[in-house]
Image (cartoon, rainbow, N blue to C red):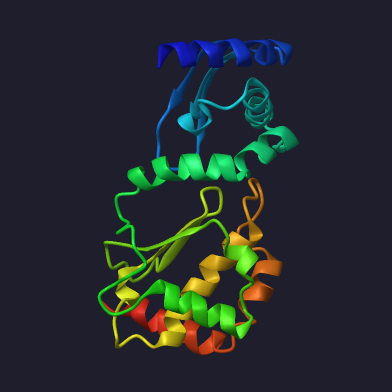
């Protein structure tokens, strides 16, 4: 990866200098989630950026690096249009999601469980009008391998991946409870990738409460989380 790291260093170094800093090192690394880390010692900065950008055009890396540097300088991060358009493109999502799924050790890779199919849940939500087909386009749903009772679902808006806890893959769990969790995570897909913004905004909570059995589902999930 040295050649890629050298390219990253060459792209970032001028921006660092323009901000009165010195770039000590720059490298790509491979966590599951898209991340950027830095270490600062005086004016010297060492930066590590997710390898999901390793083959991005120069202008995308430069654009994202400016956001990283503004964060280092404790300014409000401003994600540039060039970077956002690249990572929100179907080309990027379809390419990097494959890597993301390989790194996601807690996903079965299928919507079909022992008792339930997440697709059936999505169909009910679509038929009810709660979800728009466009909002869940180019997305991947899967059961988790571990039956977590507290974290019942997760969503990566960047990779458009939703995981649903297999604890809900049980005939004793009411369908409306599973549908509510799928709905909640699908709302994150509908919001889309919004770095630097709250995931559960007021608008999100308002949409969440449109679910017909919102209160009943929340009550059931709380009781489930409380069970040992």
Viewport quadrant of the N terminus: top left
The residue closer to the viewer here, 94 or 196, is: 94
Residue 201 on image: x %, y %: 67, 63
Viewport quadrant of the C terminus: bottom left
Quadrant of the image occupied by residue 117:
bottom left
- Quick check: 207 above or below 17? below
**Residue 15 visible (yes or no):** yes
The residue closer to the viewer here, 42 or 8, is: 8
- Quick check: 97 above or below 16? below
Report the number of numbered marks. 0
Q: Which residue is pictured at 68% across the width and 75% down the height?
A: 206
Residue 159 on image: x %, y %: 51, 48
Q: Which residue is pictured at 34% across the width and 43% down the height?
A: 103
- Quick check: 67 above or below 104? above
Residue 142 relative to residue 195: left or right: left
**Residue 75 visible (yes or no):** no
- Quick check: 53 above or below 133? above
Residue 154 on image: x %, y %: 45, 61
The residue closer to the viewer here, 2 or 205, is: 2
Quadrant of the image occupied by residue 203:
bottom right
Residue 137 on image: x %, y %: 58, 60
Q: Which residue is pictured at 41% across the width and 73% down the height?
A: 118
């Amino acid at each position: 990866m040295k050649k890629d790291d050298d390219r990253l260093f060459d792209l970032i170094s001028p921006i660092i200098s323009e901000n009165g800093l010195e770039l000590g090192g720059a490298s790509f690394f491979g966590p599951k989630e898209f991340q950027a880390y830095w270490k600062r010692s005086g004016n010297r900065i060492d930066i590590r950026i997710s390898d999901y950008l390793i083959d991005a055009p120069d202008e995308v890396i430069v654009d994202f690096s400016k956001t990283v540097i503004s964060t280092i300088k404790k300014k409000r991060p401003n994600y540039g249009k060039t970077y956002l358009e690249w990572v929100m493109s179907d080309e990027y999502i379809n390419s990097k999601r494959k890597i993301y799924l390989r790194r996601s050790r807690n996903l079965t890779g299928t919507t079909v469980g022992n008792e339930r199919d997440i697709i059936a849940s999505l169909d009910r939500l679509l038929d009810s009008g709660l979800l728009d087909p466009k909002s869940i386009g180019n997305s991947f749903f899967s059961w988790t391998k571990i039956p977590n009772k507290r974290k019942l679902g997760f969503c990566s808006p960047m990779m458009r991946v939703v995981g649903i806890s297999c604890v809900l893959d049980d005939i004793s769990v009411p369908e409306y409870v599973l549908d509510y969790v799928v709905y909640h995570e699908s709302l994150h897909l509908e919001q889309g990738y919004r770095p630097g913004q709250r995931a559960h905004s007021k608008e999100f909570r308002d949409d969440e409460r449109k679910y017909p059995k919102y209160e009943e589902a929340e009550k059931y999930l709380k009781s489930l989380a409380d069970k040992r």
